[in-house]
Image (cartoon, rainbow, N blue to C red):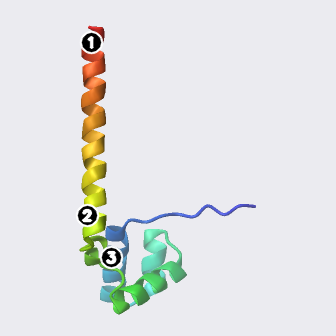
Amino acid sequence: MKKIRKNYSLEFKIQAVSLSEQRGNVSSVAEELGICKESLVNWRKLHKEGKLSKEKQISSDPIREELLRLRKELEETKLERDILKKAVGI
């Protein structure tokens, strides 16, 4: 039987960690949120190591920034092209 793996957003993980740190009881917080206790323990470990933060998502790598900019520009260009194709048909 294949297990279904759930993906949680970074914001959800950070909120779950802060909630578990406030209450101190990992098991009850995990049960309330409907997540596995081990996942919450791992997220807390990553948070303590500084690997679970919003700063991680922001890349200072210029190549990555250029790639993101080009992808956005490509999407805009495709949208403009599609609009022009529809306009020619009218």
Q: In this orientation, which residue lies closer to the viewer: 28 or 9?
A: 9
Of tags 2 and 3, which is closer to the observer? 2
> Which amino acid does the dot numbered 3 rest on?
Ile
Residue 19 percent across, percent down from the top left:
32, 80
> Which amino acid does the dot numbered 1 rest on?
Val
Image quadrant of residue 59? bottom left
Number of the label disc, if any, that sits on residue 64: none
> Which amino acid does the dot numbered 2 rest on?
Glu
Residue 51 percent across, percent down from the top left:
36, 84
* Up-down relation of residue 68 to residue 76 (above or below): below
Residue 31 percent across, percent down from the top left:
49, 75
Distance in Å between CA atoms under marks 2 and 3? 25 Å
Looking at marks 2 and 3 on the same chain, the residue that comes earlier in the sequence is marked by: 3
Residue 53 percent across, percent down from the top left:
30, 79
Circle 2 is placed at which residue position?
65
Residue under the point 28% across and 28% down: 81
Distance in Å between CA atoms under marks 1 and 3? 49 Å
Number of the label disc, if any, that sits on residue 14: 3
Q: In this orientation, which residue lies closer to the viewer: 45 or 60?
A: 60
Please rate how many residues cluster around mark 3, counting C-alpha atoms within 10 Å: few if below 14, some from 14 to 19, many from 20.
some
Name the element at disc 1: helix
Please rate how many residues cluster around mark 1, counting C-alpha atoms within 10 Å: few if below 14, some from 14 to 19, many from 20.
few
Image quadrant of residue 23? bottom left
Please rate how many residues cluster around mark 2, counting C-alpha atoms within 10 Å: few if below 14, some from 14 to 19, many from 20.
few
* Up-down relation of residue 22 to residue 54 (above or below): below
Residue under the point 24% across and 69% down: 62
Distance in Å between CA atoms under marks 2 and 1? 35 Å
Residue 81 appearing in the image: yes
- The answer to the question of whether label 2 and label 3 lie on touching residues, with beta carbons closer than 8 A, is no
Circle 1 is placed at which residue position?
88
